């Protein structure tokens, strides 16, 4: 069980304060998004990101990368993202929402970034002033969780679990690569690929 578990629905203000305190202090938190439960750390906190890597089993040079959750397009740009017109059009049309865009980061490598349609996560990012480094809150090989009990799978490696009840739908985000001026669908999810291509070509 997570080191601390609080109800997001019973006392959202206290839950938000605890999340800010935990993440700003280098902790790892589990929280509901608009798609599934996520687990994350504050970007720029190498200690917390290292803890997140160990928790998710993503250590080593070839480990699967994490995505970023941002409050808005401006915060996404601070990460060096969205340099091409097509990615910008997709972001403006489908954010906030269940679309992760893989775009060139500040160092030139591809990074996944999303603005979720979750008032709680957006407020959390604004309070922290930075994006979250995040992944779905499940051990490798397990399905992405849509309720807090399923998300509570990391024991006390997670510092805080925010229980927001069951998430309707439980579909992950669609992941689309916008690298090298080409749109490619890497994972199906909450946005129809046909809609993405229509906006990309418009």
Image: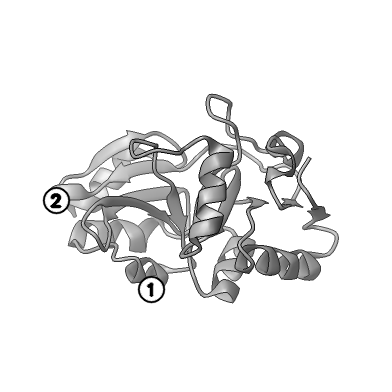
3D distance between C-alphas at marks 2 and 1: 21 Å
* Quarter placement of the N terminus: top right
Point 60% across, 40% down: residue: 137
Classify residue 137 as left or right of residue 66: right
Classify residue 121 as left or right of residue 179: right
The percent coordinates of residue 57 (x first, y second) are: 52, 35
Point 68% across, 63% down: residue: 22
The percent coordinates of residue 3 (x first, y second) are: 78, 49
What's the mark number on residue 105? none
User: Can you see residue 27?
Assistant: yes
Point 39% across, 43% down: residue: 65
What's the mark number on residue 181? 2
Q: Residue furthest top?
A: 141
What's the mark number on residue 74? 1
The percent coordinates of residue 136 (x first, y second) are: 55, 41
Sequence-first disc among 2 and 1? 1
């Amino acid at each position: 069980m997570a080191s601390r578990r609080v109800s997001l629905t019973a006392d959202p203000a206290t839950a938000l304060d605890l999340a800010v305190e935990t993440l700003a202090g280098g902790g790892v938190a589990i929280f509901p998004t608009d798609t599934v439960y996520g687990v994350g750390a504050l970007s720029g906190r190498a200690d917390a990101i290292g803890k997140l890597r160990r928790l998710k089993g993503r250590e080593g040079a070839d480990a699967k990368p994490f995505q970023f959750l941002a409050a808005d397009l401006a915060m996404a740009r601070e990460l060096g993202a969205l340099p091409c017109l097509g990615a910008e059009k997709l972001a403006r049309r489908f954010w906030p929402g269940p679309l992760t865009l893989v775009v060139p980061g500040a160092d030139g490598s591809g990074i996944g970034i999303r603005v979720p349609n979750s008032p709680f996560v957006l407020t959390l990012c604004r309070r922290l002033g930075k994006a979250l480094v995040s992944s779905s809150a499940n051990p490798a090989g397990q399905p992405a969780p849509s309720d807090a009990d399923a998300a509570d799978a990391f024991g006390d490696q997670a510092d805080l679990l925010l229980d927001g009840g069951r998430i309707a739908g439980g579909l992950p985000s669609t992941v689309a690569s916008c690298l090298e001026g080409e749109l490619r669908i890497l994972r199906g999810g909450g946005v129809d690929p046909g809609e993405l291509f229509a906006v990309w070509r418009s």
